Amino acid sequence: MVTSSLLAVGIDSSLDASPSEDGRRAPLRVLIGRDHRAIEVSDRVQELTPLRPGDRISFHPDSFLDPHEGAALRDAYRRVRRRIGASERLTVRIVDVEGRRREFDLVLSNGFADPSVGAIELVSEDVTGLRGRRVIDRLRSRLLDLLPTVVTVVDDVGTIVYCSERSRSVLGIDPADVIGRSIAESNLLPIAADQVEAIRVAAETTGRWEGDVELRRADGSTVPVQLVLERIDDDEIGFHGTVGISFDVTERRKLEDHLDFQASHDALTGLYNRQRFVRMLETALDEANDTGGRLAAMFIDIDDFKAVNDRIGHAAGDALLVAVADRLRSALPDGSIIGRFGGDEFVVYSTGVDDVAGVVDVARGLVDALSVPIGSGTDAVVVSGSVGIALSGQGAPAEELLRRADIAMYVAKERGKNRIEVFDDEVGLRKRRRREMQDELERALDADELDVHFQPELSLIDGRVAALEALTRWHHPDRGAISPIEFIPVAEESGLIHRLGALVIERSCRAMRSWLDAGLGDGLLVAVNVSTRQFLDHGFPDTVARLLDESGVSPEHLCLEVTESALVDADVALRALGRLDEIGVSIALDDFGTGYSSLSRLSKFPLDFMKIDRSFVANLDVDPASAVIVQMVVDLAHALGLQTIAEGIETQEQLQRLAAAGCDIGQGFLWSPSVTFDEATALLRNHDRRRVARGLRAGSYRGVQLDLPIGRQATKRR
């Protein structure tokens, strides 16, 4: 995480240089890589400062740099780093050793997507005393030409007075061919009339317009760009016009369209996923309410699927789910929509419902379809399904209707499975059981029955243990081990998640303190999952800061993992992430690709890691599309300046494909399950990083399994 001033050191050093015009105006140029280290440092910078290639960039306010401007410089660096193609320019004022005020123009630009740059580019120039120049002189065309964007300046009568060199690669035109011509004559902007009107209104009211348009290339084709127009009215220099910055979004649009499609469908079965299904159900409910009609929602769950899956293996289990999806789809009447919410949970809604009996007939057709053996001979598998039904009415929203169908499905399972149940007063029974679980969980928190285990995450670059993910475990004195799948939803629903989440963070920080004291925590992160409810709580950042302070652990050792669902409300999420970012902890986007994220949102969030969901990793061996998606996610993360973490690695083939795709970090049962604190400590102490790194470099990916001196290897424990 960048904080604020090898840049400042560079500026300070220049104050001791010769006051000659050439010396004062010589540019300072640095390229900064994804790891915040200098990749390239210009000769002039090396003459004036101690900065050398490979040094880590940091920004800390200095005596000559106003704290407010130091903060502005740090914030600009963060914004540029998180948005591909972004650039910002700012002026920094300092007082030199002789007490004179000096000014430096800085340009920060994100060139990660530009092969010729491949880094954050910083250019600084001493502009003391030059404020009286005309705007074109002040823009420094030679600085603008370094930006990975097309920059144009148009005067008040519509004449192009400047066009950057980047127009050659993006548009295939020579800047000299358009400078001096009007926008209309240049034919660069075949913009629609409604967009012209939008630009006009924006210019009159706010002086700024931003949107997606098409620019015309020299060969007649068009390129999609994000265009930002800024009005300039400077009476001092007598210039009135507009500066336009165009970001080529061709690849971004292709990737976003593809991800949007993937975000609406289940990767395994091709059915609608939760987000898309719920949106469609909401629309259908609105239409039914308008017309006075009714619809029914059904929740279908395969009975004892986990046991079947364990018996036939995960690959065969996935094939079984695909076959089940086909069976259900073919058994549905017209007017029905089917989706998969994950695992063995399928959902259906049917419109035009006349009565309960008709819906039960549809559900019985689904149960009958599942009862036919799947496969043949000794490979045949027989499954059954439990179905819960809920009918619309009384203004119940989509999520409530699905909740009722889900409750009815659990009643069907409790009554013997392979049954159909309609939601009714049995909900009281369900609620009582949930309440019992809540009471037991609260008692367990009071009795200190919950423990935290840790699963290692390995760097696929150098073989080190990069992080340990904290996972909650509950051993009930009477019921034994209770799965997080059972008690975490109850904790979230009841509000106990705040207490439980704080407990996990506190114990994770305590564990990290122990590892640091033992000399095992250098460069190590401990990662903690944060629920949406916990993340959106206004007091959560204060809780994190307090627990870090009490444990004596630096924020740089803590990573908080949030899911895409926590970021749906972009404004609320940005405020929460901003406060956590100020504390200094790392943020990982968990289960990326299973929710609905737009790149325009992702580029605004202060993220550090992107976790590739295990559903994509699990299919790497058999599904070429999963390999394509993984590669696209890795490329997207790196373009945004993030590192990638792949979870659920179970085979050497998956590891090999992930490493080849450029994935940074991996975790999974291939190396280790979640282990106790003592086992994790032993693992850190005995881990042979060099041996793992040799295996990774050799490409054989053998010998990468972690050493567990506790007498066992990676036995799967979920």
Image (cartoon, rainbow, N blue to C red):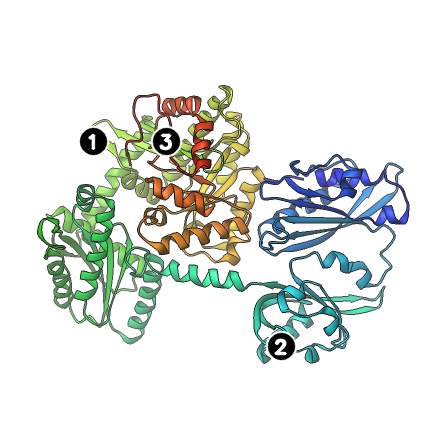
Q: Amino acid at mark 1?
A: Arg
Cα gap from disc 2 to disc 3, whole angstroms? 61 Å
The local crowd at label 1, few if under 14, some if 14 to 19, many if 20 or more residues have their Cα within 10 Å, is few
Residue 49, position as x, y percentages in the image: 77, 37
Quarter in which the N terminus is drawn? top right
Counting residues from the start of the chain, the first of labels 2 and 1 encountered is: 2
642 above or below 698? below
Ranked by sequence position, the earlier of labels 3 and 1 is 1
> At 20% across and 45% down in the image, what residue appears?
309
Q: Helix, strand, or loop for circle 3?
A: loop
Task: Please tell me in which quadrant of the rendered image residue 287 appears.
Answer: bottom left
Residue plotted at (24% across, 50% down): 318
Q: Is residue 374 left or right of residue 16?
A: left
**In this rendering, which labeled residue sits more in front, label 3 or label 1?**
3
List the residue tagged with mark 1: 479
The residue tagged 3 is: 705
In this view, 2 is above or below 633: above
The mark closer to the camera, 2 or 1, is: 2
Asked whether the beta carbons under mark 2 and mark 3 sit within 8 Å of each other, the answer is no
- Between marks 3 and 1, how big is the CA–CA gap? 33 Å
Name the N-terminal-most of marks 2 and 3: 2
Q: Which residue ends up furthest to the left in the rendered image?
A: 377
Q: Position of residue 612 (x, y in %)?
A: 41, 47
Q: Secondary structure at mark 2?
A: helix
Residue count near mark 3 (Cα–Cα under 10 Å), binned few <14, some 14–19, many ≥20: some
Of the residues shown, which amino acid type is indicated by label 2? Val
Where is residue 205 drawn, in percent x and y? 67, 70
